[in-house]
Image (cartoon, rainbow, N blue to C red):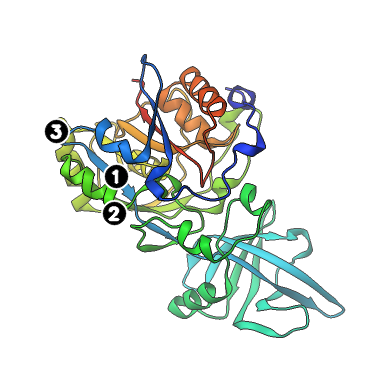
Amino acid sequence: MLLADFDFDLPEDRIALRPAAPRDAARMLVVRPGQPLVDAHARDLPAWLRPGDVLVLNDTRVIPARLKGRRRREGSDIAVEATLHRRLAQDRWSAFARPGKKLAVGDRVSFGESADRACLLGALDATVAEKGEGGEIVLAFDLSGPDLDNAIAAAGEMPLPPYIAARRPEDERDRADYQTVYAREDGSVAAPTAGLHFTDDLFARLAEAGVSTHRVTLHVGAGTFLPVKTQDVAEHRMHPEYGEVSTATAEALNAVRAAGGRIVCVGTTSLRLLESATGEDGIIRPFADETSIFITPGYRFRAADVLMTNFHLPKSTLFMLVSAFAGLETMRAAYAHAIAGGYRCYSYGDASLLFRAA
């Protein structure tokens, strides 16, 4: 398939710059195979599920992964911004850097410093250990383990998606807004945004409706924001992301399916991880590894029956995934309906509830 097959027009004023308040007041478009679209709200989710269904939540926690600092060589001093996206070791992160072309292996970068060399937030120094393509580098920090985590938490900013960051700066509200209420495992540099619509009240009503919840962890990388640059979709390669499905969770989800319940993935990250952990026989197995699964139309789903997700960018891998799940023409019609109806899009936007086409 061609990249142009996944293009559509989306007005800039549909990009949400703040989330709905309360969270479950966000709108939710219900998309079912062969049935009319239904306008609902996230708080209505229990009405669309059945007793015995299970929600699968990605409990990753977003870290303040955008770092600003200075690279100094003799006679040269430039500002550097690095967005961490994949931890490689206790002291090493892969990152996207700007300006990447002006960095070289061996360069020293001091994060948390101002242009006048005044230390703002404490020492967070690193060496450029490797340099790849497209501004990707490997940073070897002087600190390691929890000490490094604490320094990043102090010096970093929440890594808002480019389409938000280009229109307003990150602020203190984003530290809470860009985090699910059930986040607990540090490691993501992008939020699993479908989960932003959940509140404690909504979870209580889901439990009353007989819908259970289980957690998995997929640490979302900044690669999720990278555009697809190949015209032939099959030539695109995803950045790997680390995920875990515990033995207890795998057994519980298999039991739900055996009893006739449906697996409802909250977000494309939960879905991608479960599909990576599920064999051709449909059995979900424990998983602790990286995945670079790329789901496009024609993919045969093994685990997910229902998907709750936000509205995604044109020509993005996420729009390709939802088109594979519910059907390309169905999703084109759903997005046209949402855009015409004033739905808010992307990370802080409204939701859709998709029932699998086949």
Q: What kind of element bears circle 3?
A: helix
Q: Nearer the viewer, residue 316 or 29?
A: 29
> Few, some or many C-alpha atoms within 10 Å of disc 2 (few <14, some 14-19, many ≥20)?
few
Q: Which residue is under mark 3?
A: 258
- Going by the numbered disc 2, the residue's amino acid type is Asp
Whole-angstrom CA distance, mark 1 to mark 3, is: 16 Å
Q: What kind of element bears circle 2?
A: helix
- Going by the numbered disc 1, the residue's amino acid type is Val
Q: Which mark is residue 123?
A: none
Q: Quadrant of residue 165?
A: bottom right
Tell me if 166 is positioned left or right of 20 in this view: right
- Using the image, determine if residue 193 lies above or below residue 35: below
Residue 127 visible in the current orientation: yes
Q: Which residue is under mark 1?
A: 56
From the viewer's perspective, is the residue at label 1 or at label 3 nearer?
A: 1
Q: Residue at x 77, y 59 (%)?
A: 101
From the viewer's perspective, is the residue at label 2 or at label 1 nearer?
A: 2
Q: Residue at x 59, y 51 (%)?
A: 161
Residue extending farthest left: 259
- Residues tagged 2 and 1 counted as in contact (Cβ below 8 A): no
- Going by the numbered disc 3, the residue's amino acid type is Ala
Q: Which residue is under mark 2?
A: 200
Residue 107 visible in the current orientation: no
Q: Position of residue 243 (x, y in %)?
A: 38, 53
Image quarter where the N terminus lies is: top right
